[in-house]
Image (tube, rainbow, N blue to C red):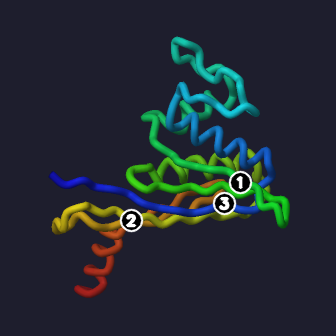
């Protein structure tokens, strides 16, 4: 049996502490509705019956209907005093969910900005199976998410060669 994986690693930089904490919280809410939260966020986000109790929990329910896995870690740059959030996957996280999260972030924290975040990922298999390797990329701003994968791009290239 073969196993398929998705890997990516990208940072969103130049953040405030509030922005970084929000992104980290939202990634936790997306991935696990009953996650243990850090000391700086001890609110109960969901009732025992699963009802969203906070603004963030309600947004997580709208953005992430299937509880995707989003791995994100916030860290402070001691030199320039800004914060960075690292989005990563070493196995099976969802790049589409990261795009939705970042768009929601831009809408909430940068409504007048022209920020763009990009991410690339690879899809691979632990066996050398034909057609089991690929990847993709996205670019996201406050309005849109543009996503391409290598299979779609290959079809476009084949059409260009046959034109």
Give the CA separation, mark 2 to mark 3. 19 Å
From the viewer's perspective, tell me whether residue 119 is left or right of residue 126: right
First-in-chain label (2 vs 3)? 3
Q: CA distance from mark 3 to mark 1?
A: 11 Å
**Alpha carbon separation for disc pair 1 and 2:** 25 Å
Q: Nearer the viewer, residue 118 or 85?
A: 85
Q: Considering only vertical position in the picture, is 101 above or below 127?
A: above
Q: Is the Cβ of the residue at disc 3 closer than 8 Å to that at disc 1?
A: no
Q: Secondary structure at mark 1?
A: strand
Sequence-wise, which precedes: disc 1 or disc 2? 1
Name the residue: 44% across, 64% down. 121
Structural crowding at the residue carrying mark 2, measured as other residues with C-alpha within 10 Å and reported as few (<14), some (14–19) or many (≥20): some
Looking at the image, tell me whether mark 3 or mark 1 is earlier in sequence order: 3
Find residue 119 and report its horizontal and vertical position in percent.
53, 64
Task: Give residue 141's position: percent from left, percent from top.
Answer: 63, 59
Label 3: which secondary element = strand
Please indicate, yes or no, whether residue 148 appears anywhere in the rendered image.
no
From the viewer's perspective, is the residue at label 3 or at label 1 nearer?
A: 1
Q: Which mark is residue 75?
A: 1
Observer-nearest of 143 and 72? 72
For mark 3, what is the residue? 12
- The x, y position of residue 98, in whole percent, is 54, 51
* Residue 112 in the image: above or below residue 36: below
Please say if the residues under marks 2 and 3 sit with CB atoms less than 8 Å apart: no
User: How packed is label 1: few (under 14 Cα within 10 Å), some, or many (20 or more)?
Assistant: some
Name the residue tied to disc 2: 122
User: For the C terminus, which image quadrant?
Assistant: bottom left
Residue at 70% across, 48% down: 107
- Left or right? Give the position of 163 relative to 83: left
């Amino acid at each position: 049996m073969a196993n398929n994986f998705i890997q990516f690693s990208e940072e969103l930089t130049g953040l405030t502490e509030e922005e970084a904490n929000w992104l980290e919280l939202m990634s936790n809410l997306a991935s696990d509705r009953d996650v243990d939260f850090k000391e700086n966020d001890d609110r109960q986000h969901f009732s025992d019956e699963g009802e969203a109790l906070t603004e963030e929990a309600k947004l997580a329910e709208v953005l992430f209907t299937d509880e995707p896995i989003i791995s994100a870690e916030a860290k402070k740059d001691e030199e320039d005093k800004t914060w960075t959030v690292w989005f990563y996957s070493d196995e099976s996280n969802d790049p589409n969910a990261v795009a939705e999260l970042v768009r929601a972030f831009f809408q909430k924290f940068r409504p007048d900005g022209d920020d763009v975040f990009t991410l690339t990922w690879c899809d691979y298999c632990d066996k050398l199976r034909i057609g089991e390797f690929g990847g993709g990329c996205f670019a996201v701003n406050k309005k849109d998410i543009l996503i391409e994968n290598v299979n779609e791009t290959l079809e476009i290239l084949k059409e260009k060669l046959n034109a």
